[in-house]
Image (spheres, helix red, strand yellow):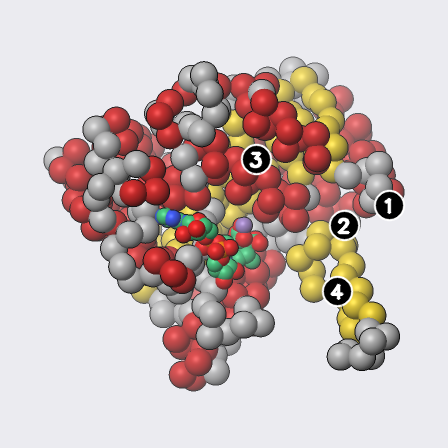
Amino acid sequence: MKPIAVIPGDGIGVDVTRESMRVLKRVNEKFGSGLEFVDFDWGADKYLKEGVTLPGGALEMLQKDFSAILFGAIGDPRVPDNRHAADILLGMRFGLDLYANVRPVRLMHEKLCPLKNVRVDDVNFTVLRENTEGAYVNAGGVFKKGTADEIATQEEIHTRKGVERIIVYAFEHARANARTKVCMSDKSNVMRYAGDLWQRCFKEVSPRYPDVKTNHLYVDALTLLMVLKPASFEVIVTNNMFGDIVTDLAAALQGGLGMAASGNISPNGVSLFEPVHGSSPPIAGKNIANPMGSILTAAMMLDHLGLTEPARAIETAVAACVAADQTTVDIGGKLGTKEVADAILEQLG
Ligand code: NAD
Ligand code: IPM
Ligand code: MN
C-alpha cells in the first residue's frame, strides 16, 4: 500500500484538492494503484481555533508513515503575518529537506498561451528551484521599530552543500529526461558573495556532465527571454527567491497559475506535491478556481511513485478537456471547479 498524506490547507487549496482527490480516487480504483489517503486539517482555521500550526511530531510522522504528501495552498487574510504558512509549508520544505522544487512548464494547448505565434512545443521546460535556503531562511532583524530611524535587515543564506546539490539535481534531471541544456540563473553581477558561490559550483559541476550544454543568464535577462524565446529553455536552475518569481511568470506562459504543477522533492525521503498557485482568498469556496494545476500535480505525484500509467491517463484527460474548452473561466471556459473535475472524470471513464 502507498499511504498519501492530504493537506488541503486554506482558501482554494481546499476547493482544488477536493477535485484532485476525486480524480486520484478514480485512477486508484481503475489502475489498482494501491493508494490510501489520510486527511490533515492543518491551516488557518486550526491555527485560529487551537493555536496549532504544524503539530508536534508531524514531520517525523510524514517521513515514517507516508509515501508522498499532496498539498493544496496556504495563506489567509485572518493571519496577516502568515505565521501558520511559514510553519506549515516552509516547515515541511525545510524540515523534510525537500531541497528540489521541480516546476515543469508545459503548454497544453496553443490557445492557453498569452504570447503570439507560440506552438505547444515552444513552451516545454522545467525550473529547478532551490527550496531550503536563500532568502527564505528568515534571517535578519529590526531595530528601532516604528520610529523614523527604523532599520530592517533581511539576509540570504547560500551554502556550498545547498547550492551544489540543486545544481547536481538539475543536471541529473536533464539526463533522466533526455534534456540537453541547463541554464543557471542568478544575479552575480550585484549579489557578489552568493553569486560567486553559485558561479563556482556551476562551473565545477558542469564538466561532470559533458553531454549537457550549459549557459548562464542574469535573472533579469532570464525573465525577458522566457517571454521572448521560451523555446530556448530546457532546464533552468536558480535560487529559492528567483525560482519563486520566475515560476509565476512561467505559469503565465502555460495559461496562468491555475495550470501550473510542482513537486518539492527529497531524493531520500518523502516528497510533497502542490500546485504553484496560492490560496486566492477572493475566489475561495465559490466553485471558480481552476482545479487543473492541482490535478496535474496529482499526476506528478503518481509519476514520482512510479505509477506512470495513471499519471499519463490523468494528463491525457486534462488535455482533452482543455481542447474541448471544458475549463474554468481563468482559461477561457465556462465551467465551475467541480464541473471541470466531472469532465476530467468522464474522460477517464
Ligand atoms: P494566488 O496564487 O493565490 O493568486 C494570484 C492570482 O491568480 C489571483 O488573481 C488568483 O485569483 C489567481 N489564481 C491563482 N490560482 C488560481 C486558480 N487555481 N484558478 C483561478 N485563478 C487562480 O497568489 P496571491 O494572491 O499572491 O496570494 C494569496 C495567498 O496565497 C497569500 O496568503 C499567499 O501567501 C499564499 N500563497 C500560497 C502558496 C502556497 O501555498 N504554495 C503559493 C502562493 C501564494
Ligand atoms: C510558492 C509560494 C510560497 C513561496 C509562499 C506561500 C511561501 O509563493 O510556493 O510559490 O514563496 O515559496
Ligand atoms: Mn510563489
Residue receiving disc 1: 193
Q: Does the numbered disc 1 mark a residue whose Cβ is under 8 Å from ligand 2?
A: no
Identify the mark nearer the N-term, 1 or 3. 3
Q: Quadrant of the C terminus?
A: top left
Residue receiving disc 4: 139
User: Alpha carbon of mark 1 to alpha carbon of mark 3: how far?
Assistant: 23 Å
The three-letter amino acid code for the residue at tag 1 is Tyr
User: Circles 4 and 2: CB distance less than 8 Å?
Assistant: no
Q: Secondary structure at mark 4?
A: strand
Rendering coords of residue 130 (x, y %): 64, 45
- Give the image quarter of residue 30: top left
User: Alpha carbon of mark 1 to alpha carbon of mark 2: how far?
Assistant: 9 Å
Q: Does the numbered disc 4 mark a residue whose Cβ is under 8 Å from ligand 2?
A: no
The three-letter amino acid code for the residue at tag 4 is Ala
Q: Secondary structure at mark 2?
A: loop
Residue receiving disc 2: 158
Identify the mark nearer the N-term, 4 or 2. 4
Q: Is residue 329 left or right of residue 168?
A: left
Rendering coords of residue 274 (x, y %): 43, 50
Q: Is residue 63 above or below residue 192?
A: below
User: Circles 3 and 4: CB distance less than 8 Å?
Assistant: no
User: Circles 1 and 2: CB distance less than 8 Å?
Assistant: yes
Nearest to viewer (mark 4 / mark 2): 4
Identify the mark nearer the N-term, 1 or 4. 4
Rendering coords of residue 122 (x, y %): 48, 19
Front one among 311 and 208: 311
